[in-house]
Amino acid sequence: MALSPKLEIRQGQTLIMTPQLMQAIKLLQMSSLDLTSYVEAEMERNPLLERADGEGGSNEGGGGEGGGESEGAGEREAGEAPSSGSEGGSERSGEGDGDVWLSSELSDSSRDIAQRLDTDLSNIYPDDPGTGRAEAGAGDAQQRDPWQTGLTTRTGSGGASEDYNLEAFVASDVSLQQHLGDQMVLAVADPVDRLVAQVLIDNLDDAGYLRLDLDDTAEQMGIARERLDGILAVLQTLEPTGVFARSLAECLALQLIEKNRFDPAMEKLIENIDLLARHDYPALRQTCGVDDEDLKEMIAELKALDPKPGSSFGETLIQPVVPDVIVRRARDGGWSVELNTDTLPKVLVNQTYYAHISRQARDEAEKTFLTECLQTANWLAKSLDQRARTILKVASEIVRQQDAFLVHGVQHLRPLNLRTIAEAISMHESTVSRVTSNKYMATPRGIFELKYFFSAAIASAGGGDAHSAEAVRHRIKVLIDAESPDDILSDDTLVKMLKEEGIDIARRTVAKYRESLRIGSSVQRRREKKASRG
Protein backbone atom coordinates (compact mmCIF):
# COMPACT_ATOMS: atom_id res chain seq x y z
CA MET A 1 0.00 0.00 0.00
CA ALA A 2 1.55 3.28 -1.10
CA LEU A 3 1.78 6.17 1.35
CA SER A 4 1.12 9.62 -0.01
CA PRO A 5 -0.11 12.95 1.40
CA LYS A 6 -3.72 13.80 0.76
CA LEU A 7 -6.41 16.25 1.91
CA GLU A 8 -9.47 15.17 3.85
CA ILE A 9 -12.54 17.07 5.04
CA ARG A 10 -13.83 16.06 8.45
CA GLN A 11 -16.79 17.39 10.38
CA GLY A 12 -16.83 17.45 14.17
CA GLN A 13 -18.28 19.25 17.16
CA THR A 14 -16.18 20.94 19.83
CA LEU A 15 -16.92 23.35 22.66
CA ILE A 16 -14.72 26.42 22.73
CA MET A 17 -13.97 28.37 25.89
CA THR A 18 -15.39 31.75 24.98
CA PRO A 19 -14.27 34.85 26.88
CA GLN A 20 -17.73 35.12 28.43
CA LEU A 21 -17.67 31.55 29.69
CA MET A 22 -14.15 32.03 31.05
CA GLN A 23 -15.41 35.10 32.89
CA ALA A 24 -18.28 33.12 34.44
CA ILE A 25 -15.92 30.38 35.64
CA LYS A 26 -13.51 32.97 36.99
CA LEU A 27 -16.26 34.71 38.95
CA LEU A 28 -17.39 31.44 40.51
CA GLN A 29 -14.07 30.69 42.18
CA MET A 30 -13.38 34.25 43.32
CA SER A 31 -13.54 35.19 46.98
CA SER A 32 -15.88 37.96 48.06
CA LEU A 33 -13.07 40.52 48.21
CA ASP A 34 -11.72 39.61 44.78
CA LEU A 35 -15.23 39.68 43.34
CA THR A 36 -15.85 43.16 44.72
CA SER A 37 -12.61 44.44 43.21
CA TYR A 38 -13.43 42.83 39.87
CA VAL A 39 -16.92 44.33 39.73
CA GLU A 40 -15.59 47.78 40.62
CA ALA A 41 -13.08 47.54 37.78
CA GLU A 42 -15.85 46.53 35.38
CA MET A 43 -17.94 49.49 36.51
CA GLU A 44 -15.09 51.84 35.67
CA ARG A 45 -14.80 50.38 32.16
CA ASN A 46 -18.49 49.99 31.37
CA PRO A 47 -20.70 53.13 31.44
CA LEU A 48 -23.89 51.02 31.55
CA LEU A 49 -23.03 49.51 34.93
CA GLU A 50 -23.82 51.40 38.10
CA ARG A 51 -23.94 50.65 41.79
CA ALA A 52 -27.24 49.81 43.45
CA ASP A 53 -27.73 52.13 46.43
CA GLY A 54 -30.82 50.36 47.81
CA GLU A 55 -33.15 53.11 46.55
CA GLY A 56 -33.83 51.74 43.11
CA GLY A 57 -30.52 52.86 41.63
CA SER A 58 -29.44 56.22 40.28
CA ASN A 59 -29.66 57.22 36.65
CA GLU A 60 -26.31 58.88 36.28
CA GLY A 61 -26.48 59.26 32.56
CA GLY A 62 -30.20 59.70 32.17
CA GLY A 63 -30.30 63.48 32.04
CA GLY A 64 -32.53 65.46 29.71
CA GLU A 65 -35.46 63.59 28.26
CA GLY A 66 -34.26 60.21 29.51
CA GLY A 67 -34.18 61.52 33.08
CA GLY A 68 -37.95 61.82 33.20
CA GLU A 69 -38.49 58.08 32.72
CA SER A 70 -38.96 55.63 35.53
CA GLU A 71 -35.56 54.83 36.96
CA GLY A 72 -36.28 51.17 37.68
CA ALA A 73 -38.02 50.41 34.39
CA GLY A 74 -34.96 49.58 32.34
CA GLU A 75 -32.52 48.39 34.99
CA ARG A 76 -31.63 44.89 36.12
CA GLU A 77 -30.02 44.29 39.48
CA ALA A 78 -27.34 41.61 39.79
CA GLY A 79 -26.00 39.76 42.77
CA GLU A 80 -29.18 39.66 44.86
CA ALA A 81 -29.22 36.89 47.46
CA PRO A 82 -31.72 34.16 46.63
CA SER A 83 -33.44 32.43 49.50
CA SER A 84 -32.57 28.89 50.51
CA GLY A 85 -36.09 27.73 49.84
CA SER A 86 -35.98 28.44 46.08
CA GLU A 87 -32.69 27.57 44.49
CA GLY A 88 -33.77 28.47 40.98
CA GLY A 89 -34.69 32.00 41.92
CA SER A 90 -36.17 34.56 39.60
CA GLU A 91 -34.50 37.11 37.40
CA ARG A 92 -35.78 40.36 36.05
CA SER A 93 -35.60 40.43 32.30
CA GLY A 94 -35.32 44.20 32.07
CA GLU A 95 -38.26 44.40 29.68
CA GLY A 96 -40.67 47.30 29.95
CA ASP A 97 -43.71 48.27 27.87
CA GLY A 98 -43.47 51.37 25.78
CA ASP A 99 -39.68 51.75 25.85
CA VAL A 100 -38.07 52.84 22.66
CA TRP A 101 -35.33 50.24 22.73
CA LEU A 102 -37.81 47.33 22.71
CA SER A 103 -38.39 47.80 19.01
CA SER A 104 -34.73 48.24 18.09
CA GLU A 105 -31.44 46.53 18.90
CA LEU A 106 -32.31 45.32 22.39
CA SER A 107 -35.19 43.15 21.23
CA ASP A 108 -32.62 40.79 19.69
CA SER A 109 -29.86 41.17 22.28
CA SER A 110 -30.04 37.50 23.34
CA ARG A 111 -30.05 36.44 19.70
CA ASP A 112 -27.03 38.64 18.98
CA ILE A 113 -25.15 37.17 21.90
CA ALA A 114 -25.99 33.63 20.78
CA GLN A 115 -24.77 34.38 17.25
CA ARG A 116 -21.59 35.97 18.56
CA LEU A 117 -20.83 32.94 20.76
CA ASP A 118 -21.96 30.45 18.11
CA THR A 119 -24.03 28.58 20.71
CA ASP A 120 -27.38 28.84 22.44
CA LEU A 121 -27.43 30.72 25.75
CA SER A 122 -29.16 27.77 27.42
CA ASN A 123 -25.94 25.78 26.98
CA ILE A 124 -24.24 28.12 29.41
CA TYR A 125 -27.04 29.16 31.77
CA PRO A 126 -29.41 26.21 32.14
CA ASP A 127 -30.89 27.56 35.39
CA ASP A 128 -31.92 30.83 33.76
CA PRO A 129 -35.61 30.59 32.85
CA GLY A 130 -35.21 33.40 30.33
CA THR A 131 -32.74 31.68 27.99
CA GLY A 132 -33.28 29.02 25.41
CA ARG A 133 -37.08 29.21 25.37
CA ALA A 134 -37.18 29.66 21.64
CA GLU A 135 -35.15 26.53 20.96
CA ALA A 136 -36.71 23.12 20.66
CA GLY A 137 -33.91 21.44 22.58
CA ALA A 138 -33.85 23.88 25.46
CA GLY A 139 -35.23 21.28 27.89
CA ASP A 140 -32.19 19.06 27.44
CA ALA A 141 -29.81 21.99 27.65
CA GLN A 142 -31.27 23.15 30.94
CA GLN A 143 -30.19 19.90 32.60
CA ARG A 144 -26.57 20.55 31.76
CA ASP A 145 -24.12 21.94 34.27
CA PRO A 146 -23.23 25.53 33.26
CA TRP A 147 -19.67 25.13 34.50
CA GLN A 148 -19.04 21.55 33.37
CA THR A 149 -17.35 22.72 30.19
CA GLY A 150 -14.55 24.14 32.30
CA LEU A 151 -12.75 20.76 32.25
CA THR A 152 -13.99 19.29 28.99
CA THR A 153 -13.41 22.17 26.60
CA ARG A 154 -10.29 23.44 24.95
CA THR A 155 -9.15 26.95 24.30
CA GLY A 156 -8.15 28.43 20.99
CA SER A 157 -4.94 30.19 20.15
CA GLY A 158 -5.96 33.09 22.33
CA GLY A 159 -7.04 30.96 25.29
CA ALA A 160 -3.98 31.64 27.42
CA SER A 161 -4.56 33.31 30.75
CA GLU A 162 -4.47 37.09 30.56
CA ASP A 163 -3.93 37.47 34.30
CA TYR A 164 -0.21 36.80 34.26
CA ASN A 165 1.06 38.21 37.52
CA LEU A 166 4.77 38.53 38.21
CA GLU A 167 4.06 38.94 41.94
CA ALA A 168 3.04 35.28 42.03
CA PHE A 169 6.69 34.34 41.62
CA VAL A 170 7.87 36.42 44.57
CA ALA A 171 8.47 34.43 47.75
CA SER A 172 6.09 35.55 50.49
CA ASP A 173 6.95 35.77 54.16
CA VAL A 174 5.86 32.84 56.30
CA SER A 175 3.22 34.01 58.75
CA LEU A 176 3.08 32.98 62.39
CA GLN A 177 0.00 30.87 61.72
CA GLN A 178 1.72 28.99 58.89
CA HIS A 179 4.84 28.41 60.98
CA LEU A 180 2.85 27.03 63.91
CA GLY A 181 0.55 25.02 61.64
CA ASP A 182 3.51 23.11 60.19
CA GLN A 183 4.72 22.23 63.69
CA MET A 184 1.25 21.38 64.93
CA VAL A 185 0.84 18.60 62.36
CA LEU A 186 3.86 16.85 63.86
CA ALA A 187 3.05 17.54 67.50
CA VAL A 188 -0.67 16.67 67.47
CA ALA A 189 -1.67 13.27 66.09
CA ASP A 190 -5.35 13.03 67.00
CA PRO A 191 -7.54 14.32 64.13
CA VAL A 192 -10.05 16.00 66.43
CA ASP A 193 -7.25 17.62 68.43
CA ARG A 194 -5.78 18.95 65.19
CA LEU A 195 -9.04 20.66 64.32
CA VAL A 196 -9.21 22.29 67.75
CA ALA A 197 -5.51 23.23 67.60
CA GLN A 198 -6.02 24.93 64.25
CA VAL A 199 -8.78 27.05 65.75
CA LEU A 200 -6.44 28.14 68.55
CA ILE A 201 -3.70 28.94 66.04
CA ASP A 202 -6.04 31.07 63.95
CA ASN A 203 -7.02 33.11 67.03
CA LEU A 204 -3.48 34.19 67.95
CA ASP A 205 -2.80 37.91 67.77
CA ASP A 206 0.27 39.48 66.16
CA ALA A 207 2.31 39.12 69.37
CA GLY A 208 1.53 35.39 69.70
CA TYR A 209 -0.93 35.70 72.59
CA LEU A 210 -4.16 33.72 72.82
CA ARG A 211 -7.06 36.07 73.54
CA LEU A 212 -9.85 33.51 73.93
CA ASP A 213 -12.19 32.50 76.71
CA LEU A 214 -11.33 28.81 76.97
CA ASP A 215 -14.61 27.89 78.64
CA ASP A 216 -16.64 29.41 75.82
CA THR A 217 -14.31 27.91 73.22
CA ALA A 218 -14.63 24.41 74.68
CA GLU A 219 -18.41 24.71 74.74
CA GLN A 220 -18.54 26.03 71.20
CA MET A 221 -16.27 23.28 69.86
CA GLY A 222 -18.17 20.59 71.73
CA ILE A 223 -15.24 19.21 73.76
CA ALA A 224 -14.34 19.03 77.44
CA ARG A 225 -12.33 21.84 79.02
CA GLU A 226 -9.70 19.34 80.22
CA ARG A 227 -9.10 18.21 76.66
CA LEU A 228 -8.76 21.79 75.47
CA ASP A 229 -6.23 22.49 78.22
CA GLY A 230 -4.21 19.46 77.12
CA ILE A 231 -4.14 20.65 73.52
CA LEU A 232 -3.09 24.13 74.65
CA ALA A 233 -0.26 22.64 76.74
CA VAL A 234 1.08 20.87 73.66
CA LEU A 235 0.83 24.02 71.54
CA GLN A 236 2.76 26.00 74.15
CA THR A 237 5.78 23.78 73.48
CA LEU A 238 6.03 24.96 69.84
CA GLU A 239 8.51 27.49 68.51
CA PRO A 240 8.87 30.39 69.08
CA THR A 241 8.80 29.76 72.81
CA GLY A 242 6.17 31.81 74.60
CA VAL A 243 3.37 31.62 72.05
CA PHE A 244 -0.18 30.73 73.14
CA ALA A 245 0.36 32.56 76.42
CA ARG A 246 -2.66 34.32 77.85
CA SER A 247 -0.71 36.97 79.74
CA LEU A 248 2.75 38.51 79.87
CA ALA A 249 3.59 36.57 83.03
CA GLU A 250 2.71 33.26 81.37
CA CYS A 251 4.70 34.18 78.25
CA LEU A 252 7.84 34.90 80.29
CA ALA A 253 7.30 31.79 82.39
CA LEU A 254 7.16 29.57 79.29
CA GLN A 255 10.46 30.98 78.07
CA LEU A 256 12.11 30.51 81.46
CA ILE A 257 10.87 26.92 81.66
CA GLU A 258 12.41 26.25 78.26
CA LYS A 259 15.74 27.65 79.52
CA ASN A 260 15.43 25.63 82.76
CA ARG A 261 15.59 28.85 84.80
CA PHE A 262 12.11 28.83 86.32
CA ASP A 263 13.19 28.31 89.94
CA PRO A 264 11.05 29.31 92.98
CA ALA A 265 12.63 32.75 93.23
CA MET A 266 12.02 33.47 89.56
CA GLU A 267 8.47 32.19 89.91
CA LYS A 268 7.85 34.69 92.72
CA LEU A 269 9.26 37.45 90.55
CA ILE A 270 6.95 36.52 87.68
CA GLU A 271 3.92 36.40 89.97
CA ASN A 272 4.72 39.90 91.26
CA ILE A 273 5.77 41.46 87.99
CA ASP A 274 3.57 44.45 88.78
CA LEU A 275 6.05 45.35 91.53
CA LEU A 276 8.83 45.33 88.93
CA ALA A 277 6.80 47.69 86.76
CA ARG A 278 6.56 50.07 89.73
CA HIS A 279 10.31 49.64 90.47
CA ASP A 280 9.48 48.53 94.00
CA TYR A 281 12.78 46.67 94.50
CA PRO A 282 12.62 46.38 98.32
CA ALA A 283 9.27 44.59 98.07
CA LEU A 284 10.65 42.31 95.35
CA ARG A 285 13.70 41.38 97.44
CA GLN A 286 11.46 40.52 100.36
CA THR A 287 8.99 38.56 98.24
CA CYS A 288 11.61 36.58 96.32
CA GLY A 289 13.98 36.12 99.28
CA VAL A 290 17.09 37.25 97.40
CA ASP A 291 19.71 39.97 97.80
CA ASP A 292 20.38 42.93 95.53
CA GLU A 293 22.91 41.11 93.34
CA ASP A 294 20.62 38.15 92.68
CA LEU A 295 17.69 40.43 91.99
CA LYS A 296 19.70 42.36 89.38
CA GLU A 297 20.63 39.09 87.63
CA MET A 298 17.03 37.92 87.65
CA ILE A 299 15.82 41.22 86.17
CA ALA A 300 18.55 41.03 83.52
CA GLU A 301 17.31 37.56 82.55
CA LEU A 302 13.77 38.88 82.20
CA LYS A 303 14.95 41.72 79.97
CA ALA A 304 16.64 39.19 77.70
CA LEU A 305 13.34 37.44 77.07
CA ASP A 306 10.94 38.30 74.23
CA PRO A 307 7.61 39.64 75.52
CA LYS A 308 6.14 39.40 72.01
CA PRO A 309 7.37 36.14 70.47
CA GLY A 310 5.01 36.37 67.51
CA SER A 311 6.29 39.76 66.36
CA SER A 312 9.49 38.22 64.96
CA PHE A 313 7.56 37.12 61.89
CA GLY A 314 6.90 39.43 58.97
CA GLU A 315 3.81 41.52 59.15
CA THR A 316 1.02 40.01 57.09
CA LEU A 317 -1.93 41.93 55.79
CA ILE A 318 -4.77 40.50 57.83
CA GLN A 319 -8.17 40.77 56.24
CA PRO A 320 -11.20 39.86 58.31
CA VAL A 321 -13.03 36.76 57.16
CA VAL A 322 -16.49 37.71 56.00
CA PRO A 323 -18.73 34.65 55.58
CA ASP A 324 -20.39 34.15 52.23
CA VAL A 325 -23.09 31.89 53.69
CA ILE A 326 -24.91 32.20 57.03
CA VAL A 327 -26.42 29.14 58.73
CA ARG A 328 -28.95 29.60 61.52
CA ARG A 329 -31.31 27.41 63.49
CA ALA A 330 -34.78 27.34 61.97
CA ARG A 331 -37.97 27.35 63.99
CA ASP A 332 -38.84 23.83 62.86
CA GLY A 333 -35.57 22.46 64.26
CA GLY A 334 -33.75 22.39 60.92
CA TRP A 335 -31.21 24.81 59.50
CA SER A 336 -31.77 28.01 57.59
CA VAL A 337 -29.14 28.66 54.90
CA GLU A 338 -28.90 32.05 53.25
CA LEU A 339 -26.34 34.12 51.41
CA ASN A 340 -24.65 37.04 53.12
CA THR A 341 -25.93 40.05 51.21
CA ASP A 342 -23.00 42.15 52.43
CA THR A 343 -20.57 40.12 50.31
CA LEU A 344 -22.65 40.24 47.12
CA PRO A 345 -21.86 43.12 44.76
CA LYS A 346 -25.02 45.04 43.89
CA VAL A 347 -24.83 46.50 40.38
CA LEU A 348 -27.45 47.60 37.90
CA VAL A 349 -27.53 47.43 34.11
CA ASN A 350 -28.96 50.79 33.14
CA GLN A 351 -30.76 49.93 29.93
CA THR A 352 -32.74 53.18 30.04
CA TYR A 353 -29.48 55.09 29.77
CA TYR A 354 -28.46 52.86 26.87
CA ALA A 355 -31.72 53.60 25.07
CA HIS A 356 -31.12 57.32 25.57
CA ILE A 357 -27.56 57.50 24.28
CA SER A 358 -27.94 54.88 21.53
CA ARG A 359 -30.30 57.25 19.69
CA GLN A 360 -27.56 59.88 19.73
CA ALA A 361 -24.79 57.67 18.34
CA ARG A 362 -23.03 59.37 15.46
CA ASP A 363 -21.44 56.46 13.63
CA GLU A 364 -21.23 52.68 13.56
CA ALA A 365 -18.19 52.62 15.84
CA GLU A 366 -20.13 54.24 18.66
CA LYS A 367 -23.10 51.92 18.11
CA THR A 368 -20.82 48.89 18.19
CA PHE A 369 -19.17 50.11 21.38
CA LEU A 370 -22.52 50.64 23.11
CA THR A 371 -23.81 47.24 21.97
CA GLU A 372 -20.72 45.50 23.29
CA CYS A 373 -21.04 47.37 26.61
CA LEU A 374 -24.64 46.25 26.93
CA GLN A 375 -23.83 42.64 26.13
CA THR A 376 -20.93 42.65 28.61
CA ALA A 377 -23.09 44.21 31.33
CA ASN A 378 -25.92 41.72 30.79
CA TRP A 379 -23.47 38.84 30.83
CA LEU A 380 -21.91 40.05 34.06
CA ALA A 381 -25.35 40.34 35.65
CA LYS A 382 -26.23 36.80 34.59
CA SER A 383 -22.89 35.49 35.87
CA LEU A 384 -23.34 37.12 39.27
CA ASP A 385 -26.86 35.73 39.64
CA GLN A 386 -25.73 32.26 38.58
CA ARG A 387 -22.81 32.44 41.01
CA ALA A 388 -25.11 33.31 43.91
CA ARG A 389 -27.52 30.47 43.13
CA THR A 390 -24.70 27.94 42.76
CA ILE A 391 -23.06 28.89 46.07
CA LEU A 392 -26.38 28.64 47.88
CA LYS A 393 -27.12 25.24 46.35
CA VAL A 394 -23.71 23.80 47.32
CA ALA A 395 -23.81 25.28 50.82
CA SER A 396 -27.30 23.92 51.47
CA GLU A 397 -26.19 20.40 50.57
CA ILE A 398 -23.08 20.68 52.76
CA VAL A 399 -25.27 21.66 55.71
CA ARG A 400 -27.54 18.71 55.04
CA GLN A 401 -24.58 16.30 54.90
CA GLN A 402 -22.85 17.71 58.01
CA ASP A 403 -25.90 18.18 60.23
CA ALA A 404 -24.28 16.09 63.01
CA PHE A 405 -21.31 18.43 63.12
CA LEU A 406 -23.53 21.47 63.61
CA VAL A 407 -25.42 19.72 66.41
CA HIS A 408 -22.70 17.80 68.29
CA GLY A 409 -19.33 19.30 67.33
CA VAL A 410 -16.15 18.38 65.46
CA GLN A 411 -16.12 14.78 66.66
CA HIS A 412 -19.14 14.06 64.45
CA LEU A 413 -17.69 15.48 61.24
CA ARG A 414 -18.62 13.00 58.50
CA PRO A 415 -16.30 11.91 55.67
CA LEU A 416 -17.29 13.88 52.61
CA ASN A 417 -15.95 14.38 49.10
CA LEU A 418 -16.75 16.59 46.14
CA ARG A 419 -18.46 13.81 44.22
CA THR A 420 -21.07 13.28 46.92
CA ILE A 421 -22.09 16.93 46.82
CA ALA A 422 -21.91 17.07 43.01
CA GLU A 423 -24.19 14.05 42.56
CA ALA A 424 -26.67 15.31 45.15
CA ILE A 425 -27.17 18.65 43.40
CA SER A 426 -26.62 17.40 39.81
CA MET A 427 -23.49 19.42 39.16
CA HIS A 428 -19.96 18.65 38.06
CA GLU A 429 -17.19 18.10 40.61
CA SER A 430 -15.21 20.98 39.12
CA THR A 431 -18.12 23.30 39.89
CA VAL A 432 -18.23 22.20 43.52
CA SER A 433 -14.47 22.58 43.77
CA ARG A 434 -14.63 26.17 42.49
CA VAL A 435 -17.52 27.04 44.79
CA THR A 436 -15.74 25.74 47.90
CA SER A 437 -12.54 27.70 47.18
CA ASN A 438 -12.15 30.87 49.24
CA LYS A 439 -15.73 30.74 50.48
CA TYR A 440 -16.66 30.75 54.17
CA MET A 441 -19.71 29.66 56.13
CA ALA A 442 -20.85 31.16 59.42
CA THR A 443 -22.35 28.49 61.70
CA PRO A 444 -23.32 28.44 65.38
CA ARG A 445 -19.93 26.76 65.99
CA GLY A 446 -17.88 29.40 64.22
CA ILE A 447 -16.81 30.47 60.76
CA PHE A 448 -15.34 27.71 58.59
CA GLU A 449 -14.10 27.51 55.03
CA LEU A 450 -16.32 25.33 52.87
CA LYS A 451 -13.39 22.99 52.19
CA TYR A 452 -13.20 22.35 55.95
CA PHE A 453 -16.22 20.05 55.68
CA PHE A 454 -14.54 17.68 53.20
CA SER A 455 -12.37 14.77 54.36
CA ALA A 456 -11.24 11.43 52.90
CA ALA A 457 -13.29 8.29 53.49
CA ILE A 458 -12.52 4.60 53.95
CA ALA A 459 -15.07 2.00 52.90
CA SER A 460 -16.92 -0.02 55.50
CA ALA A 461 -16.37 -3.78 55.62
CA GLY A 462 -20.06 -4.46 56.19
CA GLY A 463 -21.28 -2.17 53.44
CA GLY A 464 -22.43 0.53 55.86
CA ASP A 465 -21.40 4.15 56.13
CA ALA A 466 -17.82 4.98 55.19
CA HIS A 467 -15.29 5.96 57.83
CA SER A 468 -13.21 9.09 57.85
CA ALA A 469 -9.50 8.55 57.15
CA GLU A 470 -8.61 10.75 60.12
CA ALA A 471 -10.88 8.69 62.36
CA VAL A 472 -9.23 5.46 61.20
CA ARG A 473 -5.78 6.92 61.81
CA HIS A 474 -6.87 7.90 65.31
CA ARG A 475 -8.27 4.40 65.93
CA ILE A 476 -4.92 2.83 64.96
CA LYS A 477 -3.14 5.04 67.47
CA VAL A 478 -5.59 4.10 70.22
CA LEU A 479 -5.09 0.39 69.56
CA ILE A 480 -1.31 0.69 69.61
CA ASP A 481 -1.29 2.79 72.78
CA ALA A 482 -3.42 0.18 74.53
CA GLU A 483 -1.31 -2.82 73.49
CA SER A 484 0.44 -4.91 76.12
CA PRO A 485 4.27 -5.13 76.19
CA ASP A 486 3.86 -8.91 75.99
CA ASP A 487 1.48 -8.75 73.03
CA ILE A 488 2.65 -6.22 70.45
CA LEU A 489 0.21 -5.72 67.61
CA SER A 490 1.56 -6.26 64.11
CA ASP A 491 0.13 -4.54 61.05
CA ASP A 492 -1.70 -7.72 60.03
CA THR A 493 -3.24 -7.94 63.50
CA LEU A 494 -4.36 -4.33 63.27
CA VAL A 495 -5.99 -5.05 59.92
CA LYS A 496 -7.98 -7.93 61.44
CA MET A 497 -9.06 -5.84 64.43
CA LEU A 498 -10.17 -2.98 62.21
CA LYS A 499 -12.12 -5.29 59.92
CA GLU A 500 -13.90 -6.69 62.97
CA GLU A 501 -14.96 -3.11 63.71
CA GLY A 502 -16.31 -2.73 60.17
CA ILE A 503 -13.35 -0.88 58.62
CA ASP A 504 -12.14 -2.35 55.32
CA ILE A 505 -8.48 -1.38 55.08
CA ALA A 506 -5.33 -2.90 53.55
CA ARG A 507 -2.16 -3.72 55.45
CA ARG A 508 -0.07 -1.25 53.47
CA THR A 509 -2.58 1.48 54.35
CA VAL A 510 -2.26 0.63 58.04
CA ALA A 511 1.54 0.83 57.72
CA LYS A 512 1.28 4.20 55.97
CA TYR A 513 -1.01 5.60 58.66
CA ARG A 514 1.22 4.21 61.41
CA GLU A 515 4.31 5.83 59.88
CA SER A 516 2.48 9.14 59.49
CA LEU A 517 1.83 9.01 63.24
CA ARG A 518 5.56 8.45 63.78
CA ILE A 519 4.92 5.05 65.40
CA GLY A 520 7.57 2.40 64.91
CA SER A 521 7.04 -1.12 63.65
CA SER A 522 6.04 -3.97 65.95
CA VAL A 523 9.70 -5.04 66.28
CA GLN A 524 10.81 -1.55 67.29
CA ARG A 525 7.97 -1.15 69.76
CA ARG A 526 8.72 -4.53 71.36
CA ARG A 527 12.35 -3.54 71.90
CA GLU A 528 11.42 -0.15 73.34
CA LYS A 529 8.88 -1.56 75.78
CA LYS A 530 11.23 -4.30 76.91
CA ALA A 531 13.93 -1.71 77.51
CA SER A 532 11.56 0.46 79.51
CA ARG A 533 10.55 -2.50 81.66
CA GLY A 534 14.13 -3.60 82.21
Image: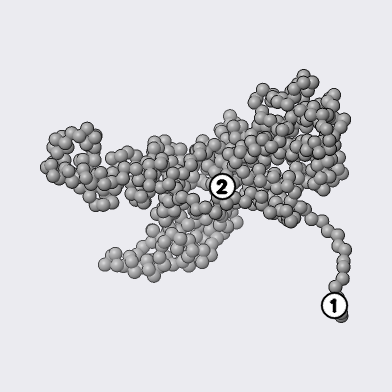
The residue located at (73%, 36%) in the rendering is 377
In this picture, residue 466 sits left or right of residue 481: right
**Front-most of residues 421 and 522:** 421
Outermost residue toward the bottom in this view: 1
Q: Give the camera-side residue of 500 and 60.
A: 60
Disc ID at residue 451: 2
User: Dot 1 corresponds to which residue?
Assistant: 3
Q: Position of residue 70 (x, y in %)?
A: 76, 21
Apparent side of residue 108 relative to residue 268 in the rendered image (left or right): right
Residue under the image location 48 percent in, 65 percent down:
511
- Res. 55 mark: none
Disc 2 residue type (three-letter): Lys
Q: Is residue 86 above or below residue 499?
A: above
- The quadrant of the rendering that contains the N terminus is bottom right
Give the SS element for disc 2.
helix
Q: Nearer the viewer, mark 2 or mark 1?
A: 1
Amino acid type at mark 1 = Leu
Left or right of 475? Residue 385 is right
Badge 1, how many Cα within 10 Å: few under 14, some, many 20+? few
Q: Is residue 459 above or below residue 306?
A: below
- Residue 345 visible here: yes
Identify the coloring. Answer: one colour
Q: Position of residue 274 (x, y in %)?
A: 24, 34
Give the camera-side residue of 55 and 377: 377
Q: Position of residue 493 (x, y in %)?
A: 46, 66
Q: Which quadrant holds residue 275?
A: top left
